Image (cartoon, grey):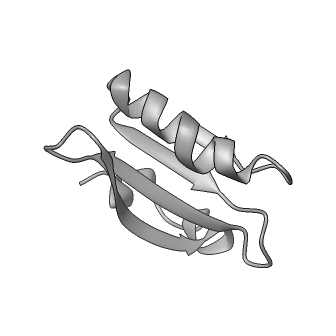
């Protein structure tokens, strides 16, 4: 699942949807922030059933890597 954070929906995108996606069992949740670097945060399901942050990086860097590099 990839979520692009819209102005004014930060709380919904970062908390409510994250909880709903975890409950649905979606194994990876990518969040793209609309900050200067367009920061991408990769979350994966932890043993607790909640998401944990795996990495945070600028979108430009992510686009220059292979998807498999981020799917450990």
Q: Is residue 3 left or right of residue 67?
A: right
Residue at the image point whose x is 77% and y is 46% from the top:
9
Q: Is any part of residue 18 visible from this angle?
A: yes
Q: Is any part of residue 1 visible from this angle?
A: no
Residue 41 at x, y = what percent? 51, 62
Q: Is residue 52 left or right of residue 14?
A: left
Rendered view: 49 above or below 54: above
Q: Is residue 55 left or right of residue 30?
A: left
Residue 34 at x, y = what percent? 78, 63
Residue at the image point whose x is 40% and y is 52% from the top:
43
Occupied quadrant, residue 59: bottom right
Q: Nearer the viewer, residue 69 or 21?
A: 21
Q: Nearer the viewer, residue 64 or 41?
A: 41
* Residue at the bottom extreme, as displayed: 36
Residue at the image point whose x is 45% and y is 57% from the top:
42
Residue 70 at x, y = what percent? 36, 58
* Residue at the left extreme, as displayed: 47
């Amino acid at each position: 699942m990839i979520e692009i954070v819209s102005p004014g929906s930060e709380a919904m995108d970062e908390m409510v949807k994250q909880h709903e996606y975890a409950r649905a069992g979606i194994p990876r949740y990518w969040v793209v922030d609309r900050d200067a670097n367009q920061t991408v945060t990769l979350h994966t399901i932890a043993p607790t059933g909640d998401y944990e942050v795996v990495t945070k990086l600028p979108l430009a860097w992510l686009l220059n890597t292979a998807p498999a590099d981020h799917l450990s």
